[in-house]
Image (cartoon, rainbow, N blue to C red):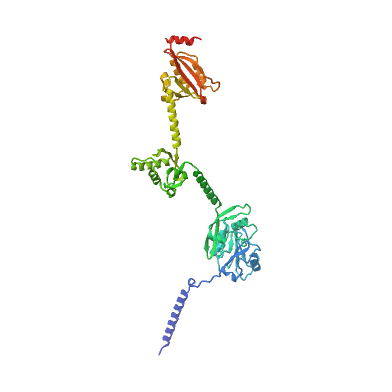
Amino acid sequence: MISAFDIACILLAILASGSVAYLWLSHEKTPDTAAPKESEPKISYLFDHGVLQHASDGIGEFCALEPGFHEWSDLYDFVVEMFPQFPPEPKSGIAGSQYISSSDTTTSRQIKISWDQHLCRIVVFDPDKEDPLAETDSRTLLRCLSSGLSIPVWHTNKAGKILWSNNACHELHERVYPGQPCSAQPLFDPVRLEAAKRISVRIASTQKKEWYEITNIEIHGVLCYQAICVTDLVRAEEARRNFVQTLTKTFAHLSIGLAIFDRNNQLALFNPALVDLSSLDAEFLSSRPTLHCFFDRLRENRKMPEPKNYTDWRLAISDLISAAHDGRYEETWSIDTGQTLRVRGRPHPDGATAFLIEDISAEVSLTRSFRAELELGQSLLDTLEDAIAVFSMAGVLTFSNAAYQKLWQVDPEKAFADVTIYDAVQIWKRRCAPNFSWGEIESYVGNIEDRKHWSMPVYLSEGSQMTCNISPITAGATLIRFHMSEKLTTPAVAQDLIATP
């Protein structure tokens, strides 16, 4: 039989264990393990020029509006009773924000209005449950960022329908299609957008084309386009093409063969004259041969002098290329066929090198013929016994025969500088008896008016008598001829004859 004392002990044990279990359970349930409250879906609207462009998924709990069909006034009519301070027109201008509290004391909902230029965003939130600064979806954020860009930006669906466009796009559309809405007349043809990335539009006021480079990205099924103006680039490319065409036409009419090699020593440009002068096929030249290959083919076609040693010749070609880079290369090639070519190398920008090949056979032939005629005339005059000298209009000795050089013991070809009429008169004076007419000869040579033939007697110091004939010839030149007449007995007699009036 259980005593009262035992029953009391059992009851105390039960109470103690229950207290411990209660304290343990109450310690385990802390605020950290409590289930978080579920936040309400964010309610946001994005207006562009007062037209709803985007709305979040949770607007059904507040005011269900459809993007593209509803405007600011629709939202205003719904919220004005609950939020009397809600503006009747969307905010615009410099970026800013405004918070509006509800007049209903039973709710803690607020409205945040944010604007930047013509974009205005509305966020309806409960400050006790939501963060009004939470991120919007990527499309909304992208539109906000794109609105202030100076380049046209617009969004379309995959069918090509425009969903949104920024200010720059509206301005360009107004310049191209004045007075027409974007929905009625797209700025860029969707078909052309698929076919080309560079599209032109014609400005209505000037009727001039502007070119735009079109790029796009896809975000959540929306195609986001941007157009970068490349008009200046297109015009620069056209100017470069026109310049190259002009140069090509000019080169085509040149009689000088032109070969331009780029920095890699490959043929980049040539004209038809090069084909004729080098006897190289146009097909070979069009294959862009290297410099060494080009000169190898010239040697094979016998259009350059045949080298005695091929190895030395290859080294000479390398020196030739180096000299052309410095603009120092210029040679005359005499070919076995009798043709003479002048080859010049000139540096060009960006490491390029130009070679000019000119046929100077006619020039060389004319020079040789002219030189032969001069040599023939010289040999004929050298056979004359009279001493002959020709002075130019400037008074410079341009010609003398062998008799003149023997008479006066001079060789004008070996003179350090040009021999003038003054120098010649000084020589004549030293070897002749005094004569007052030497100064008249000097004045006659420099005179361009009243030039008539005249003569004067000249007596050498050793007694010989000569006649000096002064005659004008073509181009203002003067011919002076000394003719030996007779020999006097003594120099004194010659001086008396000169002194006798």
- In this view of the protein, can residue 172 be seen by the observer? yes
Which of the 4 quarters of the picture holds residue 148? bottom right
Residue 97 x, y percent position in the rendering: 60, 61
* Image height of 183 relative to 301, above or below: below
Which of the 4 quarters of the picture holds residue 115? bottom right
Which of the 4 quarters of the picture holds residue 466? top left
Residue 250 x, y percent position in the rendering: 51, 44
| Residue in the picture at 52% in, 50% down | 237
Residue 86 x, y percent position in the rendering: 64, 64
- In this view of the protein, can residue 464 be seen by the observer? no
Q: Does residue 109 appear to the left or right of 326 in the view shown?
A: right
Q: Nearer the viewer, residue 216 or 427?
A: 427
Q: Nearer the viewer, residue 441 or 157?
A: 441
* Image height of 283 relative to 73, above or below: above
Residue 11 x, y percent position in the rendering: 44, 84
Quick one: which residue is furthest to the bottom in this view?
A: 1
Q: Which of 187 and 127 is in front in this view?
A: 187
Q: Which of 216 and 481 is in front in this view?
A: 481
* Image height of 42 relative to 430, above or below: below
| Residue in the picture at 52% in, 63% down | 218
Query: Total marks drawn?
Result: 0
Quadrant that contains the N terminus = bottom left
